[in-house]
Amino acid sequence: MPHKLTNILALVPSDIVIAQAATPIPISRIASDAGILSEELEPYGSTKAKVHLSVRDRLKHVTNGKYIVVTAITPTPLGEGKTTTTVGLSQAIGAHLGKRVFTCIRQPSQGPTFGIKGGAAGGGYSQIIPMEEFNLHLTGDIHAITAANNLLAAAIDARIFHENSQKDEALFERLCPPNKYGNRTFSPVMLRRLHKLGIAKSDPNELTSEERSRFARLDIDPESIAWRRVIDTNDRMLRQITIGQGAEEKGFTRSTGFDITVASEVMAILALTTGLNDMRERLGRMMVAISRAGEPVTADDVGVGGALTVLMKDAIMPNLMQTLEGTPAFVHAGPFANIAHGNSSIVADQIALKLVGPDGYVLTEAGFGADIGMEKFFNIKCRYSGLIPSCVVLVATIRALKMHGGGPKVTAGQPLATEYSQENLDLLEKGCANLVKMIQNAQAFGIPVVAAVNRFKDDTAAEIDLVRRIGVNAGAEDAVMSDHWAQGGAGAIELGKAVIAACEKPRDFQFLYPLDMSIKGKIETIVREMYGGARVEYSREAEKKIDLYTRLGFDKLPVCMAKTHLSLSHDPSLKGAPTGFTVPVRDVRASAGAGFVYPLLGAMSTMPGLPTRPAYYDVDLDPQTGRVVGLS
C-alpha cells in the first residue's frame, strides 16, 4: 500500500543511501494492491516482476484513468529532474492525496549510468526502488534487444557472404534443402517473402527457375546497409569499424559501426508495439538495406523476423517496480529522445490506465524537452496508441532558466558559476522565454499545461514567484513549486492538486500535422511550430533519401526528428527561445518497423563516448554485505 515517508532527513543523503535505507514492499503485494492477479505476474525475485499483457484484455471494459505526460524546458547538460518530478508527483497523488496512481517511465541505458550522467531512477526522496536493479540489468530487456539487433546484423552479412560465393540455384538448394524423404518445404518466414514477391505458391518444387532466383537472391547493395551492431556501453572506438578481415571471409570487408543499444530500432519497436502480433509484423518489416535494383530489403527477407520475435517475447511484458512511498511503477523500454522517440512503452501505459480505473491517474514521461520528447509523444506515440492525455506537466528549474537567460556555461562535472547560486531576477526573466515557448508547444496540441518548478536549495522565494507568474501569464493552468527531492511526495502535494484540477479542464486535442503531408512538409512544420526556426536546408543525401522513401510509401509515416536536446534549435549553443534560424537536414533515414522517418539535424552521434572521469570510478561492491556502492 502507498505510505508516507517518516524518516526524511534535513540534510538529504545520496540517492543510493536513501534507496538502500528503504524496505521495499514485496512485489507480489504491490501487484495485488494494483489489481494484478497472481497468474498475470512473472516475479524476478521479490522486488520486481514482469506483467502479462493479458491483464489489459481482462480489464478491457474498464474506463481508462487520467493520462498525464511529464515533459520539460530545454535542459542543461545536468538534467532538470524530470524523472524525479514524475516520481515525486506520483508519490503525492498516491500516498498523500489518496488517489490510485501508476508511474510509467523508461529503463535507463547502462552507457550513461557508467558514463557521465549516472542512473535515472529519480533522486532524493523521489525514486524508483531498488535503484541498483532499476539502473543495471533489471529483467534483461536491453540485453534481449542487443541480442535481437546483433542477430539481424550477423544475418545480413552472412547472406551477402553466401550470395557472393554461390549461384542462384545453389542458393535455393541450400535455403530449401530436401529432407531425408526428398521433400522440400518453405519455413513460415519464407512464405512471407514469396507473398511480397507476388509468388502465390507454397511448394518449393513448383517454383520456376526465374522465381527461384528472385526468391533466393536478395542482391543487397553493401553501400546501402543501414543496420549497425549495438552494445549497451559508451564505447567511442566502436563508432566506425571494419568487419570481415578474417581469412575465411574471403575478402568481404566493409565499414560499419556500433550504436548504443537504446538507439536500435528494436528498442523503438518495443516502445511502440501494442502486442505480440503487432511486434512480429514490425520486426519483420524493418528495412535493413536496399537491393541493387532499388527495392527495400527487410528483416523478413533476410529470414530472421520470427527469430527476433522469439528473442523479444518476454521483453514485451512491462516491468513492475515501486516508488519509495509504495506507489506502483512500470519501467519499460528506453529509447533516447534525441535520436529516437524518447518515450516508455505503449503497452505499459495501456495496462496502467486500466488498472487505475476512471478515478485514477497515470503519469508517463517524455524524454528531454517539449520540443523533442513531448512532440514525439503526441505525433508518434499517441498516433499508435490511440491515447490522448488529460494534462501536460512541464518541469522547469531556476538553474536552467538562468542559463537560457545568458548565464555562464553549465558543464557536467564542473562547479556551477555563482550566478546559479545567487538571486538574479534579470537573468531569470530573460531565460523564461524558453519556458513560455515550451508552454506554447504544449498548447499547440490542445492539452492543459501545468508548470512544475523543481526546487533546488539555492532558489529564492522571489525567483520562484517570478517563474510562477510568467508561467501562468503564458497560459499554464497553474505554475507550482515542488520540493519532492527533499521531501518526497509531501513536497509535491500542491503540484498534485494542480494536476488533478487540470485533468478536469476541457481538451481540444489535435496532431501537429496530418500523415498525408509530405516528408518535407512535416519536417518544416515541426521546425516552424516547435523550434521557432524560419527555414530548412536539405543536403543532397537528404533530398535523395526523401525521394526514395516517398517512392516506397514511407512519406505517410510520422517523422522523428534527431536533434540536440540542449537547444530549441539544431545548434546546442543557441539558448533561450531563438527564432529565424535555418535548420540543416544532413540525412534522412527510415525506421519502417517502428513506423517513422527520422531526419538528422546537424551532427548527431548514436554512440556516446566516455569522459575522462566516468561514473564507474565510484561504483563498487561491498563484499561483506553484497551491496552496490557509489551508484548515482
Image (spheres, grey):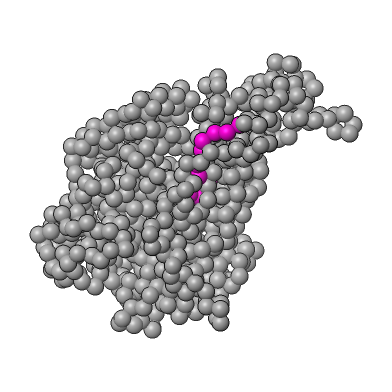
The answer to whether residue 184 is above or below residue 328 is above
- Residue 572 appearing in the image: yes
Q: Nearer the viewer, residue 255 or 364?
A: 255
The answer to if 626 sits in the magenta stretch is no
Q: Residue at position x 41%, y 64% from top? A: 615
* Picture coordinates of residue 629, whole percent (x, y): 47, 74
The answer to whether residue 594 is above or below residue 115 is above
The answer to whether residue 596 is above or below residue 110 is above
Q: Nearer the viewer, residue 4 or 149?
A: 149
* Picture coordinates of residue 269, whole percent (x, y): 51, 45
Q: Quadrant of residue 200?
A: top right
Q: Quadrant of residue 27?
A: bottom right
* Picture coordinates of residue 26, whole percent (x, y): 56, 75
Residue extending furthest right? 181
Q: Residue at position x 62%, y 63% from top? A: 42
Q: Residue at position x 46%, y 54% from top? A: 234
Q: Which residues are magenta?
A: 252-266
The answer to whether residue 485 is above or below residue 319 is below
- Residue 499 appearing in the image: no
User: Is 622 left, or right, of 66 in this rendering?
Assistant: right
The answer to if 257 sits in the magenta stretch is yes
Q: Residue at position x 61%, y 66% from top? A: 43
